[in-house]
């Protein structure tokens, strides 16, 4: 093929072009971070449509987040719009007028992107269920209709809590809903149904949880609702049991594409397999005519094993999906070896770090960009000075670079809790920011209330939603009345709505409750009349007005009420945006979008602000400037990973993901003391990951300031003299660059000549007696975990901590 003639191969290297050009059969693209996997996948979709004349409705593309899906659609629209503009006007895109640009994009949307199924596994398969869930045959006879509600984690947990307390009469302290939900979710992720769960359940507790699971499933069905796990599990069961349904989707989706394949779990893998091979063993599946499965991934970035993801699925792809080529010994793998994202300094650091993992296939990842600046490492006294140091750093950057945009910067951390202090510093300095992954917009009370109305309108079986809004805003329906009705509903086995809307039942009540209930029934009946001929955004407004929700907020006239009103306005905006993005926009679709949205999806190009997020949410993204904070043993890597080599390797992959998000500049931070979980200040040892980055790539920068410096001074008294002298030297300036080797010496310190072993008894000048439980690293990189009598384990650097070995006699 003539590569010059085709714009979708432009801007790609040879290997990427091969991947994009590939037409029939399986293809695996494995490559390190920033090597253009996602770019290749996006271009491939455009190429399939324009070059191979694939109908857009035959393409199914899986992304890891909703945001990535949206961006991919936008990117495709732009790519394709540019192309038709070039054909029709023979002008470069930049000289096409804005009006015409929009016309082209609208046309592409109409003709192409609206028919493309691009989304997360959950979004795609909930869409599939809207078509076919009524064909699902459940072993226990449970049924769902296409108007099913999607319950998020809060809804699911409250349902489980009710079962634990009301149906099972168990103590919710002993059977914490959250933990029970987790156990059930775990089972569902492995495709285990209640009967199997019961068989394998151990002990009385296990048996009781099995019972909750069974009741929970029944309750979901009674509410015509599914939880997140069901959105994958039900399609697997359905596609397995119903050949007609399976063949339909198999024939419909001829081309499957999956991004971030290293983080798929076995249920998701099962779905891909069923769609691609129509249930035939993938190794024997040979009819690849006009059909393909294209996955891209990087085993070094597999970071979701706690959600049952397994990178062995990626490793097994070639064995799983064979084609003629692979039988002839030709490879169906493409490797990309050039990184286009980061400076070579950043890339060298990341490559060196990840090479410490044992369970991996070595691969090449070469830099294509210049060396760039050294990585800056800042050591701080505690989490507060760390936050200050980050902000100080950002302000310095701002002062030196007029073109700096806050939107170019990300601050990444291991745990959500770390954002608070950083936020406080940013607020103090008036720097705009957004926290990704905080409280979901759709989890706010007022938003959930209005969504509950909408769910009830289309799904009268949804008693969880009904209970939420029956007396919201207040209608004088008493608690006892509500309890009586819900008891009746569960005894009769009919939806709560049927009970509360029964005229007889309403009449049987006296006074205020009866009045309120009648009002409620009339409201819902009235709103239902508008259901079929009203857009989601208008329905939302109708609900807010007719229910009296908005007028109550206005009457309340507090700041909080005003904030809630604004959030509801934002809900209307969200529905408008949904309508713009989907031609066949309906309420079911909007509710599904709301249920599956996460805060990481927020579209945020309008504001120029810093992004704060966990390392986990940063996967797939890139930023010119990245600050990574909290590089300490026990925090990152996390405490739980310290005595488990496999989890430590996962933490290292997470660090690799973090480092490789940076394009130009990378700033690392760690503190020598930290208050964790709201408890006592604990001494902290720098992360093992820091010692795995070659020292010549890092320059140090010690921050010591204010009260923290004093506290540190006091602690310093316990340290060796050599260390103290060096520290005083360093603390003479607030931020002072040190030559690399001085920093290295600082971090390594003089070897004390004690060789530590697990089981050694020690005496600590502050914590008292303890026993060594783990040893991490050796030589200069050693740190040890000690369990002190009467307190939790601590991780210390034996060369700095005031400890002495105690001799057993
Ligand atoms: N052939 C290329 N020439 C120039 N730039 C490219 C090329 N391929 C990709 N890029 C750019 O490199 C950056 C990384 O690309 P992309 O996000 O597709 O990588 P990735 O392999 O998906 O990364 P990750 O593993 O982090 O998901 C992007 O800014 C992209 O536009
Ligand atoms: Mg990517």
Image (cartoon, rainbow, N blue to C red):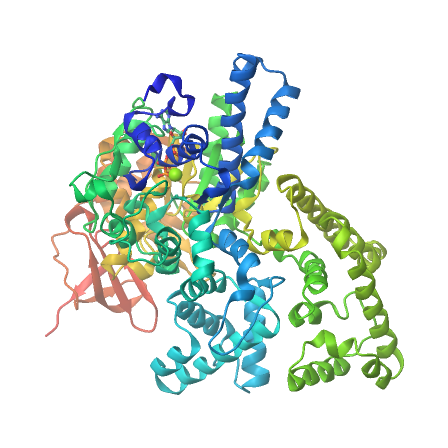
Q: Specify whether 149 is left or right of 711.
A: right
x and y percentages locating residue 370 in the rendered image: 31, 21
x and y percentages locating residue 184 in the rendered image: 44, 72
Number of numbered markers: 0
If the image is split into quadrants, where does the N terminus sit? top left
Which is more toward the observer, 183 or 233? 233
Vertical relation: 331 (above or below) 653 = above
x and y percentages locating residue 699 in the rendered image: 30, 32
Q: Is residue 363 visible?
A: yes
x and y percentages locating residue 731 in the rendered image: 36, 37
Q: Specify whether 345 is left or right of 519.
A: left
Q: Specify whether 505 is left or right of 335.
A: right
- In which image quadrant can residue 555 be found? bottom right
Residue under the point 20% across and 45% down: 361
Which is more toward the observer, 320 or 192? 320
- In which image quadrant can residue 444 be found? bottom right
Q: Specify whether 734 is left or right of 461.
A: left
If the image is split into quadrants, where does the C terminus sit? bottom left
Q: Is residue 339 visible?
A: no
Residue under the point 41% across and 47% down: 615
Which is more toward the observer, 676 or 215? 215
Vertical relation: 395 (above or below) 753 = above
Residue under the point 35% across and 47% down: 261
Q: Quadrant of ligand 1?
A: top left
């Amino acid at each position: 093929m003539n590569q010059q003639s085709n714009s979708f191969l432009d801007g790609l290297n040879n290997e990427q072009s091969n991947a994009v050009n590939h037409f029939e059969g399986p293809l695996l693209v494995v490559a390190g971070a920033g090597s253009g996997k996602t770019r290749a996948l996006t271009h491939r979709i455009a190429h399939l449509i324009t070059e191979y004349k694939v109908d857009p409705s035959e393409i199914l593309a899986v992304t890891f987040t909703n945001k990535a899906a949206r961006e991919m659609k936008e990117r495709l629209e732009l790519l394709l719009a540019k192309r038709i503009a070039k054909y029709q006007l023979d002008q470069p895109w930049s000289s096409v007028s804005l009006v015409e640009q929009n016309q082209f994009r609208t046309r592409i949307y109409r003709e192409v992107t609206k028919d493309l199924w691009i989304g997360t596994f959950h979004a795609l398969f909930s869409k599939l269920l809207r078509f076919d869930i009524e064909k699902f045959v459940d072993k226990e006879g449970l049924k769902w209709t296409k108007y099913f509600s999607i319950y998020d984690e809060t809804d699911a947990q409250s349902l489980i809590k009710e079962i634990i307390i009301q149906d099972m009469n168990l103590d919710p302290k002993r059977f914490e809903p959250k933990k029970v939900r987790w156990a059930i979710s775990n089972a569902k992720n492995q495709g285990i149904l209640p009967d199997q769960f019961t068989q394998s359940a151990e002990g009385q507790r296990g048996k009781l949880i099995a019972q909750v699971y069974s009741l929970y499933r029944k309750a979901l069905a009674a509410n015509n609702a599914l939880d997140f796990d069901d959105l994958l599990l039900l399609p697997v069961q359905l596609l397995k049991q119903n050949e007609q349904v399976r063949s339909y989707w198999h024939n419909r989706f001829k081309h499957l594409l999956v991004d971030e394949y290293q983080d798929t779990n076995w249920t998701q893998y099962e779905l891909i397999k069923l769609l691609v091979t129509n249930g035939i063993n993938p190794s024997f599946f040979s009819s690849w005519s006009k059909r393909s499965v294209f996955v891209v991934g990087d085993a070094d970035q597999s970071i979701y094993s706690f959600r049952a993801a397994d990178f062995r699925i990626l490793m097994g792809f070639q064995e799983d999906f064979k084609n003629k080529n692979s039988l002839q010994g030709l490879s169906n793998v493409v490797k990309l070896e050039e990184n286009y994202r980061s400076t070579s300094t950043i890339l060298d650091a990341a490559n060196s770090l990840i090479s410490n993992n044992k369970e991996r296939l070595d691969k090449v990842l070469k830099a294509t960009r210049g060396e760039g600046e050294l990585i800056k490492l800042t050591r701080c006294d505690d989490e507060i000075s760390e936050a200050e140091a980050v902000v100080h750093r950002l302000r310095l950057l701002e002062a030196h670079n007029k073109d700096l945009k806050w939107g170019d910067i990300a601050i990444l951390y291991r745990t959500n809790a770390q954002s608070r202090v950083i936020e406080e510093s940013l607020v103090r300095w008036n720097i705009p920011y957004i926290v990704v992954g905080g409280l979901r917009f759709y989890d706010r009370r007022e938003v959930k209330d209005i969504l509950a109305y909408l769910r009830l309108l289309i799904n009268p079986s949804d008693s969880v939603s009904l209970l939420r809004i029956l007396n919201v805003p207040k209608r004088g329906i008493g608690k006892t009345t509500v309890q009586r009705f819900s008891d009746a509903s569960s005894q009769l086995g009919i939806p709560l709505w049927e009970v509360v809307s029964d005229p007889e039942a309403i009449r049987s009540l006296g006074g205020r409750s009866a009045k309120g209930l009648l009002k409620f029934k009339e409201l819902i009946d009235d709103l239902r009349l508008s259901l079929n001929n009203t857009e989601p955004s208008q329905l939302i407004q109708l609900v807010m007005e007719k229910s009296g929700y908005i007028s109550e907020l206005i009457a309340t006239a507090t700041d909080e009420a005003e904030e809630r009103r604004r959030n509801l306005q934002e809900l209307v905006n969200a529905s408008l945006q949904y309508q713009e993005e989907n031609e066949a926009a309906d309420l079911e679709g909007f509710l599904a979008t709301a249920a599956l949205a996460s805060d990481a999806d927020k579209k945020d190009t309008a504001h120029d602000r810093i992004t704060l997020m966990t390392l986990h949410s940063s996967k797939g993204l890139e930023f010119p400037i990245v600050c990574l904070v909290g590089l300490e043993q026990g925090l990152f890597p996390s405490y739980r990973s310290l005595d488990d080599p496999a989890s430590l390797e996962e933490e290292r992959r997470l660090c690799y993901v973090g480092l490789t998000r940076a394009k130009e500049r990378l700033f690392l931070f760690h503190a020598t003391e930290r208050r964790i979980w709201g408890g006592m200040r604990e001494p902290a040892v720098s992360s093992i990951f820091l010692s795995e980055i070659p020292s010549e790539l890092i320059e140090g920068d010690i921050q010591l300031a204010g009260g923290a410096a004093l506290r540190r001074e006091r602690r310093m008294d316990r340290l060796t003299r050599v260390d103290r002298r060096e520290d005083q030297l360093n603390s003479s300036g607030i931020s002072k660059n040190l030559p690399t080797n001085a920093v290295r010496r600082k971090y390594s310190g003089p070897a004390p000549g004690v060789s530590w072993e697990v089981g050694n008894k020690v005496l600590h000048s502050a914590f008292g007696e303890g026993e060594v439980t783990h040893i991490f690293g050796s030589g200069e990189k050693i740190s040890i975990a000690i369990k002190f009598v009467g307190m939790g384990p601590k991780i210390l650097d034996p060369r700095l901590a005031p400890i002495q070995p105690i001799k057993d006699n």
